[in-house]
Amino acid sequence: MDDPTQASIPLIGDNPEAKFFSTLEKFRFDDGSAFDFRGDSDHSANGRSGRLANSNERSLKGFEATEELGRRFGPIGQYKLDWIFVRPEHLDNSRDHSAFSCYHGRTLSAVNHAIPDRISDHNPITVDLPLASPRQTGSATAAAR
């Protein structure tokens, strides 16, 4: 419930969603590219690291909830149901940042709760997607001088 990307431990902590995330992380498109599962603290919204932290906001334990039941009791009644999966322009390794690399994934629960009855039962989520790689932006800046 807290982190569906974590592996299942039979008889102790079954996680039926783990296989979905593992399969999606291993999936390759025809051109060899893959979804961005990186999660380094420098590119996450709140400095937390872990799988998918760059595209989906991590919390102290797992991910920030995107769906809330009408009534909740502490953390019970909150779930991470909405996800952002990004396919960058090119991704060779975990440190390669290119166009459409995802950064600063956020869950905007404060926006959703700005009015008394909530805007929706799902909190909106956002991610920053640069349109050019850092190398291309640096070259353009140098050429403009």
Image (cartoon, rainbow, N blue to C red):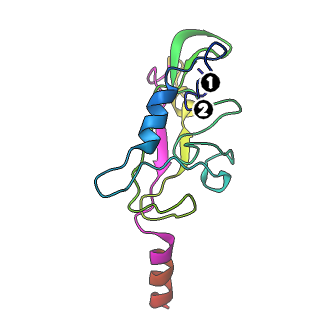
Q: In the visual, does 39 lie left or right of 36?
A: right
Q: Is residue 135 visible?
A: yes
Query: For the residues marked 1 and 2, what is the alpha-carbon distance in whole angstroms?
Result: 7 Å
Residue 22, above or below 33: above
Q: Position of residue 19 (x, y in %)?
A: 47, 28
* Residue type marked 2: Phe
Q: What residue did someone put label 1 on?
A: 2
Q: Position of residue 31 (x, y in %)?
A: 30, 58
Span shown in magenta:
118-136
Residue furthest front as drawn: 10
Q: 109 or 140: which is nearer to us?
A: 140
Q: Which mark is residue 123?
A: none
Label 1 SS: loop
Q: Position of residue 79 (x, y in %)?
A: 54, 21
Residue at x 47%, y 57% (from the top left corner) = 101
Q: Is residue 124 visible?
A: no
Disc count in the image? 2
* Residue type marked 1: Asp
Q: Earlier in the sequence, mark 1 or mark 2?
A: 1
Query: Magenta segment: does it hold 93?
Result: no
Q: 6 or 89: which is nearer to us?
A: 6
Q: What residue did someone put label 2 on?
A: 63
Q: Residues within 10 Å of mark 1 (few under 14, many from 20)?
A: some
The dominant secondary structure in magenta is loop
Residue 30, above or below 25: below
Residue at x 46%, y 65% (from the top left corner) = 98
Q: 99 or 104: which is nearer to us?
A: 99
Residue 117, above or below 52: above
- Say which quarter of the image contains residue 129: bottom left
Label 2 SS: loop
Q: 74 or 109: which is nearer to us?
A: 74
Q: Are the two marked residues, 1 and 2, in contact with CB atoms closer than 8 angstroms?
A: yes
